[in-house]
Image (cartoon, rainbow, N blue to C red):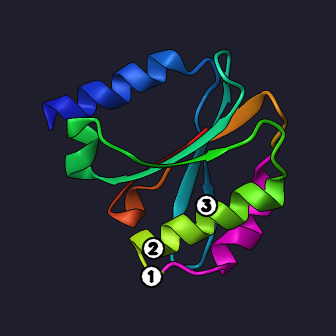
Amino acid sequence: MRKLTAFIFTLGLLTPYPVIAQPISPESLYLKLVDYQLKQSGNFLIGITNDRKIIDGKFVCRRFRSGASKEEIINTFLRVVSEFDPQIDSPSGNAMLEYLSVTSATGVTIFCPEFKGWTRFR
């Protein structure tokens, strides 16, 4: 638990913007959206992991080209999430469209404790 707390704290130090929690479904799934400037590659990265793999620092990742469309990223996000948890379906995507604003230089970090894991999307 201490390692996970330290990981969350360290990640908070790396993000220059406040975390915003938004309800996205009647099942009370929450997304915490953090704007993140990608200074290195300009690519988007999505990682899905369970609590154990977070502590081990391992992620299942998908990369996006710089300037990928919002729909492309959200569709890939939902596809990867559905592989991780088949019970999560497309209604979440409709709510995500309202909250995500994606440009070629900016991504979003999403933490989803309700997925029995965390999703880092940036």
Q: Quadrant of residue 107?
A: top right
In front of the other: label 1 or label 2? 2
Helix, strand or loop status at disc 3: helix
Q: Is residue 63 above or below residue 74?
A: above
Q: Quadrant of residue 55?
A: top left
Question: Percent x, y for residue 69?
Answer: 84, 51
Marks 3 and 1, how far apart in space?
A: 13 Å
- Is residue 28 something that shows in the picture? no
Left or right for 41, reference 49: right
Q: Which type of secondary structure does the marked residue at label 1 adopt?
A: loop
Q: Quadrant of residue 113?
A: bottom left
Q: Which residue is mark 1?
A: 86
The residue that label 3 is drawn on is 77
Up/down of 97 relative to 43, above or below: below
Residue at the limit of the structure toward the left, as seen here: 1
Tell me the kind of residue under disc 2: Glu
Which tag, 2 or 3, sits closer to the chain's start? 3
**Magenta-colored span:** 88-101
Three-letter amino acid code of the residue under disc 1? Pro
Q: Is 77 part of what is drawn in magenta? A: no
Q: CA distance from mark 2 to mark 3?
A: 10 Å
Reply yes or no: does residue 91 show up in magenta: yes
Q: Do residues under tags 1 and 2 come within 8 Å of each other at their CB atoms?
A: yes
Q: Estimate the x, y position of residue 46 in percent, counting from the top left.
A: 55, 47
Badge 2 element: helix
- Residue drawn 66% across the image and 23% down it: 41
The residue that mark 2 highlights is 83
Q: Earlier in the sequence, mark 3 or mark 1?
A: 3
Q: Is residue 86 left or right of residue 79?
A: left
Depicted 26 relative to depicted 121: above or below: below
